Amino acid sequence: MPLLFGPAGIPSSSRVQKPEEGIRECARLGLDCMELEFVYGVRMTESGAKLARAASEETGIRLTAHGPYYINLASQEQGKIEASEERILITARRGYQCGAESITFHSAFFQNRPAGQVLRIVERELKLILTQLQKENVEIDIRPELTGKPSQLGSLEDLIELGKRARGILPCVDFSHFYARDAGRYNRYEDFCGALDRLAHGFGKKILKRMHIHLSGIDFTAKGERRHLPLEKSDFNWRDCLRAFADYEVEGFCICESPILEQDARLLKDTYQKLRKDK
């Protein structure tokens, strides 16, 4: 598939703030996809999932989903690990019922522990999740996200390592977080190309045809991400990021997490199409 563009959640212009109506609004706006935001819990019922699936099939709008924020697969409390597992499982189940093709989530915090220790714990938990979903015949991509703060597991290297250790795990690459996580260090065309090269080396070139990407404007401090911003109000070099996608012929989902969801999703799509046309 080509690179598809859409918002992280129901467009604000949707007169009815329900997933199925948000999907139809994305189609009306000329967008390609939408991320279902389960960030405060999976509150959608099975009947609601059927409505979302029907709208997706009716419009051709493709779907992804974002799991709850309250996930820490490496918590120092076993009960919180088990609750995190269940939140990912229910996100995957409900997303699959909606027809979503990919889910993402923030996987863990370091909590002053060595990275290797946390990686081992998360690897174990992800393998358990993959095994359970396979038993249930739930076919959906499971993708830890590239996170915006160095206190969280989720650097580009972490995602590549998890993919090597837990077969079937794929990355969700938030390029705005890639920029903010290291306080603006990576913000050039060459940096974005380098990230794509590392992904292709770690997962195989086929990963570039099966991407789940997040983009937005972003503000940061020395500790990483602070808040999302509209694209034009950020120093994040999103145009050169899109240029790298065009040059590498990236395919998959590009989800806009800007505060002005559909406006910036459309700006991303229009800019990308112009870059492709001008090649």
Image (spheres, helix red, strand yellow):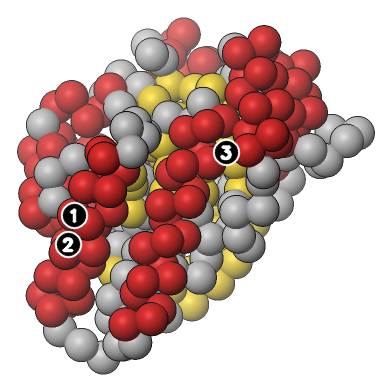
Give how far apart the Cα atoms at labels 2 and 1 are.
Answer: 6 Å
The quarter of the picture where residue 55 lies is: top right
Circles 2 and 1: CB atoms closer than 8 Å: yes
Q: Position of residue 272 (x, y in %)?
A: 50, 23
Which of 1 and 37 lies nearest the eye of the viewer? Answer: 37
Left or right side of 216 for 207: left
- Mark 1 or mark 3: name the one nearer the start of the chain: 3
Which of 171 and 239 lies nearest the eye of the viewer? Answer: 171
* Residue at mark 1: 127
Q: Position of residue 7 (x, y in %)?
A: 63, 37
* Residue at mark 2: 123
Q: Amino acid at mark 1?
A: Lys
* Relative height, residue 269 to residue 104 (above, below): above
Q: Give the label on residue 35, or none.
A: 3
Q: Residue furthest right?
A: 15
Q: Amino acid at mark 3?
A: Glu
Q: Amino acid at mark 2?
A: Glu
- Give the crowd class for mark 1: few <14, some 14-19, many >=20 residues within 10 Å: some
The residue under the point 36% across, 35% down is: 138
